[in-house]
Image (cartoon, coloured by chain):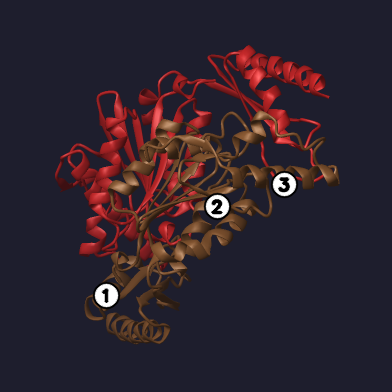
Chain colours: A red, B brown
Amino acid sequence: MSPESGTPTEIVAVGRELLTGRTVDTNSAWIAARLTDLGAFVARIVAVDDEPAAIAGEIAGARRRGAALVITTGGLGPTLDDRTLAGVAAALERRLVEHPDALAFVARRYAELAATGAVADAALNPPRRKMARLPEGAEPVDNAVGTAPGVLLRDGARALLALPGVPAEMRAVFDAALPRLRQCLGAPAHVAEREVASGSGDESVITVAVERVMDTVPGVYLKSLATAFAPDCDLRVRITARAATRTEAEALVARAAERLAAELARLR
Amino acid sequence: MSPESGTPTEIVAVGRELLTGRTVDTNSAWIAARLTDLGAFVARIVAVDDEPAAIAGEIAGARRRGAALVITTGGLGPTLDDRTLAGVAAALERRLVEHPDALAFVARRYAELAATGAVADAALNPPRRKMARLPEGAEPVDNAVGTAPGVLLRDGARALLALPGVPAEMRAVFDAALPRLRQCLGAPAHVAEREVASGSGDESVITVAVERVMDTVPGVYLKSLATAFAPDCDLRVRITARAATRTEAEALVARAAERLAAELARLR
């Protein structure tokens, strides 16, 4: 399975807390799993500081490398160090302009929060208003959990989606944007996956069988799941196939599993 | 606190499993936390596929950006898709050559494993031998947990450290390499950190106080820890300071905490 069979995408996670190790970047793994299940392939995940220049550099690089979709996460909130959209605007050479629908969204969310007492008032103060300043030509995406709208920017067949960094908000905005992403994700590929026991704890032996299967069953990807060595260890091998239909992907996995069992038996 | 006050470092995590979201990259967070505690700052964390060209591109980019230390994790094992050292060699324009000490290490580890029955034999077959092929001029680093040695490459004041991807091995090799990293990490900075309650659930309000503290207490970094809104939510603010001594760093944090309390009181 060549990853190139899916739409190339990249993820840019923004936030100093990722670089100090205070926060583990679970957002990128979640987004990567969703994109993979949708048949895209993620070529690269990068975490950078809350610096527009660093963010812009990563986005520009991703587009130069041919990413059809770039997803950022983090840095959309009301605080001074939420600067992802400044980075997006710089990368795509656009101005940041107040978007009427985004402002209406922010106003509605703060009105709702003020009604429940979660915030003191619904005034559109500068930090709140800031969340409605989007790169020119972008569309806001509903955020059912927080107050910062997501931001979708489509140009031709390519797109950029900026998601919040709070995990529940990130997931909600991803799902809200999904119908509008389908076009740039192309025809969905189907991925089938199976983990099998190898009967061995020695990766240096299993690798010979794994390589033979990948050489003889085109379209599948095998990976032995390395762990610590132990006499009673039974290393597992993950078999993944990607194809136009689920049936086809599953047939490839079944063929590879059968072949792997035969190769492993030969090594014993 | 400017991150530039520490030694600039970058982390390159290698492995398709990170890009499909099957594995959350906890290794990079662990390394980042260790480097931060040692007074360095991590400018960037990137995850790429098991492709020498992609790996080489990230390492070369990190060094171009001025990283004094680049740490890779993953891709040192015996399997065909363990290709990190090929990427390192390409980035630094060196050949891969069998290193006698590395080969002795691999031989010793497999002899130990064969003695306990964890592997069938201790023969130095090609996949095992591959782990001893290091970029010219590199030194192996002991791996007390697995069979692949870590790899340290020092040139002048800069260094590159390649760690395994299995977390327990990664941690063991990092600790084994640490005495040899001190030189490129420079004088250790001391980091003090405290989390305080803000008494508010509204980040768009807290941000005003946070910004005032950062403007008036140089050398500290404050971050409100965004979560979902809720009427009973009390957002926490993390205060971090970095200084030449622990006493100095703690004094900065105390001053910022006092100032923050005053600013928050003014907003009520």
Which mark is first along the chain, 1 or 3?
Answer: 3
Q: CA distance from mark 3 to mark 1?
A: 52 Å
Q: Which residue is mark 1?
A: B214
Task: Tell which of B85 and A64 is nearer to you.
Answer: B85
* Residue B153 x, y percent position in the rendering: 45, 50
The disc numbered 2 marks a residue on which chain?
B
Do the residues marked 2 and 3 share a common chain?
Answer: yes
Q: Nearer the viewer, mark 2 or mark 3?
A: 3
**Residue at position x 62%, y 32% in the image:** B79
Judge whether residue A175 can be spotted in this image.
no
The quarter in which the N terminus of chain A is drawn is top right
Check disc 3 and give the amino acid type.
Arg
Q: Which residue is mark 3?
A: B109
The disc numbered 3 marks a residue on which chain?
B
| SS under mark 3 | helix
Lateral position of residue A146 relative to residue A218, left or right? left
The quarter in which the C terminus of chain A is drawn is top right
| SS under mark 1 | helix
Question: Are discs 1 and 2 less than 8 Å apart at CB?
Answer: no
Which mark is first along the chain, 2 or 1?
Answer: 2
Q: Which residue is mark 2?
A: B26
* Residue A158 x, y percent position in the rendering: 30, 28
Q: Nearer the viewer, mark 3 or mark 1?
A: 3
